[in-house]
Image (cartoon, rainbow, N blue to C red):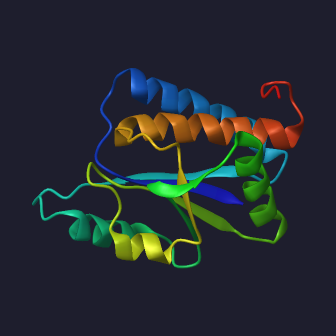
Amino acid sequence: MRVSIYCVGRLRQGPEHDLIANYLTRFDRTGRAFGLTLGDVLEVEDKKNQGITAEGNLLRRVLPKSSVIWALDERGETLSSPEFATGLGQLRDRGTSDLALIIGGADGIDPSLCNEAARSISFGRMVWPHMLVRVMLSEQLYRAASILAGTPYHRV
């Protein structure tokens, strides 16, 4: 299953960029043996500052039509790392070919796009800057692949 990340906003060079690249490389290496591969990491930007609806439309344009969508949203369900890994494994085992993980901009994800998602996930009740959400998502993808592989990276 190809796992892709679609985000609002551009990530510039710096520590977040380096962490994301590191964790996504680890995810791709670990996950390949277990049917998980890194797909696209695409960024969209509302250069006209038209708001959350325009951002949602930009995301819709780049999302593959056949992909299952999981939205990263502060109002979503809070999962443990093993639960997140199990969710990825279940999608893979059902034959899902593409999973699109979407991260909104500073104001979140357009509610109508969030409603189209098969699942909405939160990294806790606190609000996180969307750039840090990318880092945390990248790490959790690697952790999920490690859990599915049975490696000691994730300790219970």
Compared with 115, 11 (above or below) is: above
Residue at horizontal 56%, vertical 38%?
138
Q: Quadrant of residue 3?
A: bottom right
Q: Residue at x 81, y 38 (%)?
A: 147
Residue 106 or residue 4, whichever sits in front: 106
Name the residue furthest top: 15
Foreground of the two, 76 or 151 = 76
From the viewer's perspective, is 76 left or right of 94?
left
Image height of 22 relative to 78, above or below = above
Does residue 11 appear left or right of residue 134 in this picture?
Answer: left
Residue at image position (42%, 40%) is 126
Q: Position of residue 111 (x, y in %)?
A: 36, 71
Give how far across and how far down residue 110 sits, in percent: 32, 68
Q: Which image quadrant is residue 94 in?
A: bottom right
How many circles with numbers are drawn on the protein? Answer: 0
Residue furthest front in the image: 125
Relative depth, front residue between 53 and 7: 53
Q: Nearer the viewer, residue 120 or 15?
A: 120
Decide if residue 21 is on the left or right side of residue 11: right
Q: Residue furthest left?
A: 48
Residue at 24% in and 55% down: 45
Residue 142 placement (x, y as % from top left)? 68, 36
Q: Position of residue 156 (x, y in %)?
A: 83, 29
- Image quadrant occupied by the N terminus: bottom right
